[in-house]
Image (tube, rainbow, N blue to C red):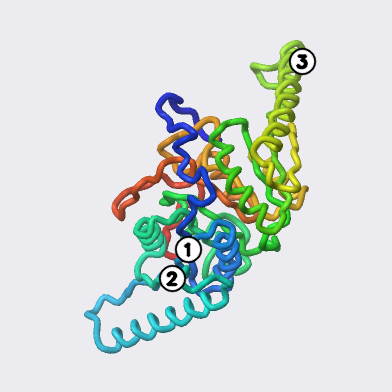
């Protein structure tokens, strides 16, 4: 699910940092006091129950922008803002059906993306839950908000991206799991089992076979026939593969279905199937068969984070990477807007 690199230099499946459900022990929930970000709270409760994790609810206050020296009025205003944020987080924690000892509220100040990355690294968050758009973005359905984009570009663990316009129920009734045949993509299956067992969700395993298209280098009838024959063989093998996965790796789930589709474009096919099959959540690994170890997410995952309109749970299959304030992590191929506002 990404660009090609030297396979010998890549971590193996055993390096998948979240190979087991209990590997998600610390969850960071990003809140900006908007109705959009409040949509993260049901997912936070769901993750806490599915994985037995602790939750840290984070709200970032903006940095002071005045050029003059701070005065007593500024200090009073800052203290009022801090208390309001504390009350907001207390109310948010009170609305979660989670034991209070598993909940922590944090208020930070500064650039939202930088502060979220810093707190995630400090608490060693295994999962960061955030909304695709934040305060001031009501009604927007296009590309990711700038804060979400920059948080994702700095992510060192797994992420759950919530879509504010999604009507998907929590807990999900149907979970879509794309598999490309690699062990790397299969590292999500223990997590899927944990989520599916919580409320008996249906799991749909999906594999996309690339449909051959006529080009300047694939144009003769004989070549097209050969390509079509190979695609059919891959489709048959994929159906057998998903059946084996269902029996061997998902025996604890009551409802597991498999689907193999042939499409010209894999990434859009995943979105189309999610819509057609009314999936409530998309769960996949950050990388697949091909992998660029220098990027947090492969090309397919990056595309889905940008364009899918349903909640996406991305399990990070690479070892945790440190991100410092002055480092420049690779950006997702999305907007280049600055991270201060949505």
Quadrant the N terminus occupies: top right
- Residue 13 pos. (x, y %): 49, 34
The residues tagged by marks 2 and 1 sit, at their Cα atoms, a distance apart of 8 Å
- Which of 114 and 8 lies nearest the eye of the viewer? 8
Residue 54: numbered disc: 1
Q: Is residue 184 visible?
A: yes
- Residue 174 pos. (x, y %): 72, 52
- Residue linked to disc 2: 104
Which SS class for mark 2? strand
Q: Is residue 31 above or below residue 263?
A: below
Label 3: few (<14), some or many (≥20) within 10 Å? few
- Residue linked to disc 3: 225
> Measuring 49% from the left and 46% from the top, which residue is drawn there?
18
> Measuring 24% from the left and 79% from the top, which residue is drawn there?
68
Looking at this view, name the residue that lies furthest to the left. Answer: 69
> Measuring 68% from the left and 17% from the top, which residue is drawn there?
218
- Residue 194 pos. (x, y %): 61, 52
The residues tagged by marks 3 and 2 sit, at their Cα atoms, a distance apart of 60 Å
């Amino acid at each position: 699910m990404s660009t090609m690199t030297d396979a010998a230099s890549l971590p193996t499946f055993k390096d998948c940092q979240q190979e087991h459900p209990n590997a998600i022990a610390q969850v960071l929930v990003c809140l900006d006091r908007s109705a959009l970000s409040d949509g993260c709270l049901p997912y936070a409760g769901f993750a806490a129950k599915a994985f037995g994790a602790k939750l840290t609810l984070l709200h970032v206050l903006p940095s002071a922008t005045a050029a003059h020296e701070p005065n007593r009025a500024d200090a009073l205003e800052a203290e009022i803002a801090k208390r309001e944020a504390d009350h907001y987080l207390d109310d948010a924690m009170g609305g979660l059906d989670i034991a209070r000892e598993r909940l922590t509220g944090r208020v930070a100040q500064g650039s939202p993306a930088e502060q979220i990355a810093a707190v995630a690294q400090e608490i060693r968050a295994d999962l960061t839950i955030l909304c695709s758009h934040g305060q001031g973005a009501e009604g927007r359905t296009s590309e990711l908000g700038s804060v979400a984009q920059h948080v994702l570009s700095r992510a060192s663990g797994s992420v759950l991206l919530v879509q504010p316009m999604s009507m998907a129920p929590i807990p999900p009734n149907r979970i879509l799991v794309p598999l490309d045949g690699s062990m790397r993509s299969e590292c999500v299956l223990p997590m899927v089992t944990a989520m599916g067992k919580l409320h008996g969700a249906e799991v749909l395993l999906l594999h996309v076979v690339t449909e051959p298209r006529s080009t300047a280098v694939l144009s003769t009838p004989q070549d097209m026939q050969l390509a079509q024959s190979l695609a059919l063989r891959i489709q048959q093998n994929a159906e057998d593969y998903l059946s084996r996965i269902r029996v061997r790796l998902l025996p604890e789930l009551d409802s597991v279905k498999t689907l193999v589709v042939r499409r010209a474009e894999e990434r859009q096919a995943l979105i189309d199937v999610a819509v057609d099959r009314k999936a409530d959540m998309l769960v996949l690994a950050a990388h697949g068969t091909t992998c660029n170890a220098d990027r947090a997410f492969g090309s397919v995952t990056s595309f889905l984070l940008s364009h899918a309109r349903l909640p996406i749970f991305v399990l990070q299959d690479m070892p945790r990477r440190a991100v410092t304030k002055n480092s420049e992590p690779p950006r997702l191929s999305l907007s280049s807007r600055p991270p201060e506002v949505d």
